[in-house]
């Protein structure tokens, strides 16, 4: 059993889509409320810290980022290395376009805490900053943390294409397309395959894929 927070953290920046998916499952009768899991382990039993984390998360989900930020800042005053507070502050900074601040918060998390989601979000921030080699290193680390995730291949293809490495982009796109988990490729796959093929000069293939 997983909590909503755990699902959201694994989904990273697509927490809104996570909420929509959960709502659909609830409506279909596949998900039911099973209470709340204690966060005593992550807070060390500090009730004030736990309250800041819970309230901050609730504010964040409601789109009240300033209020959420205030709660997470207070949590970090208690424990500067607190994993969830730093992760959520990183997401808030990312949404505001403060990419350096976002990287700082992700980097302040203790090793082993949310490795996959941290690597994915860090990679996205680095990609938007034009730091493509660093972004690829983070995506490689994400693939080590979760080898079965085909979406990492697609993310790598995008970064390779942005860095003008068309050959590597095509290889990553093939890795995504041939993954056993990919039954129906996403629209994003087709869009970037068309772009990569066109840049490589294979216009016939680009048109066929398009």
Image (cartoon, grey):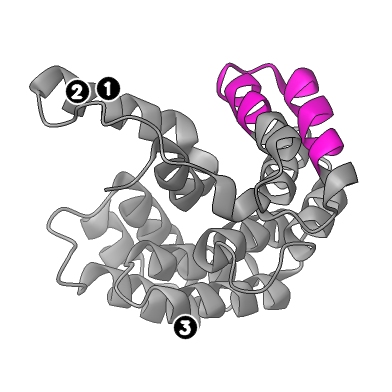
Q: Are marks 3 and 1 in contact (CB under 8 Å)?
A: no
The vertical placement of 4 against 99, above or below, is: above
Q: Quadrant of residue 144?
A: bottom left
Where residue 124 appears, as percent x and y from the top left, is 63, 56
Instruction: Tell me if mark 1 has few (under 14), some (14-19) or many (20+) residues whose alpha carbon lies within 10 angstroms of its own.
Output: some
Q: Is residue 176 left or right of residue 166?
A: left
Lower position in the chain sequence, tag 3 or tag 2: 2
User: Was residue 84 drawn as part of the magenta stretch in this picture?
Assistant: no
Residue pictured at 77% horizontal, 36% vertical: 72
Residue 89 position (above or below residue 160) = above
Q: Are marks 1 and 2 in contact (CB under 8 Å)?
A: yes
Query: Which residue ends up furthest to the right in the rendered image?
Result: 77
Quick check: 142 left or right of 88?
left
Q: Which residue is mark 3?
A: 167
Q: Secondary structure at mark 2?
A: helix
Instruction: Say whether residue 172 is visible.
Output: yes
Q: Look at the numbered disc 1 and give the secondary structure of its residue.
A: helix
Is the residue under label 2 in contact with that under label 3 (CB below 8 Å)?
Answer: no
Q: Earlier in the sequence, mark 3 or mark 1?
A: 1
The tag on residue 23 is 1
Write the start and end of the magenta stretch as one range. 54-75
Question: Disc 1 and disc 2: Cα gap in Å?
Answer: 5 Å
- The image shows residue 93 at horizontal and vertical percentages of 78, 40
Is residue 197 at all visible to an observer of this figure? no
Q: How many marks?
A: 3
Front residue (pair 106, 82): 82
Q: Is residue 79 left or right of residue 145?
A: right
Label 3, secondary structure: give it.
Answer: helix
Q: Residues within 10 Å of mark 3 (few under 14, many from 20)?
A: some
The residue labelled by disc 2 is 26
Question: At 79% from the left edge and 59% from the top edge, which residue is drawn?
Answer: 81
């Amino acid at each position: 059993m997983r909590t909503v927070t755990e699902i959201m953290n694994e989904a990273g920046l697509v927490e809104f889509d996570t909420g929509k998916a959960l709502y659909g499952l609830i409506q279909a009768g596949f998900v039911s409320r099973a209470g709340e899991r204690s966060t005593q382990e992550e807070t060390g039993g500090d009730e004030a810290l736990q309250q800041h984390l819970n309230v901050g998360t609730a504010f964040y989900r409601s789109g009240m980022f300033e209020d959420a930020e205030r709660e997470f800042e207070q949590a970090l005053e208690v424990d500067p290395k607190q994993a969830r507070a730093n992760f959520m502050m990183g997401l808030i900074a990312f949404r505001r376009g403060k990419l350096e601040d976002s990287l700082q918060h992700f980097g302040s998390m203790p090793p082993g805490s949310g490795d996959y989601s941290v690597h994915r979000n860090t990679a996205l921030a680095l990609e938007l900053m034009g730091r493509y080699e660093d972004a690829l290193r983070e995506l490689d680390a994400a693939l080590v943390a979760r080898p079965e995730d085909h979406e990492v291949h697609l993310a790598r293809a995008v970064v390779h294409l942005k860095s003008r490495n068309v050959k590597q982009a095509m290889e990553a796109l093939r890795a995504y397309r041939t993954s056993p988990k990919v039954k129906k490729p996403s629209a994003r796959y087709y869009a970037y395959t068309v772009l990569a093929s066109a840049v490589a000069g294979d216009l016939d293939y680009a048109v066929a894929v398009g």
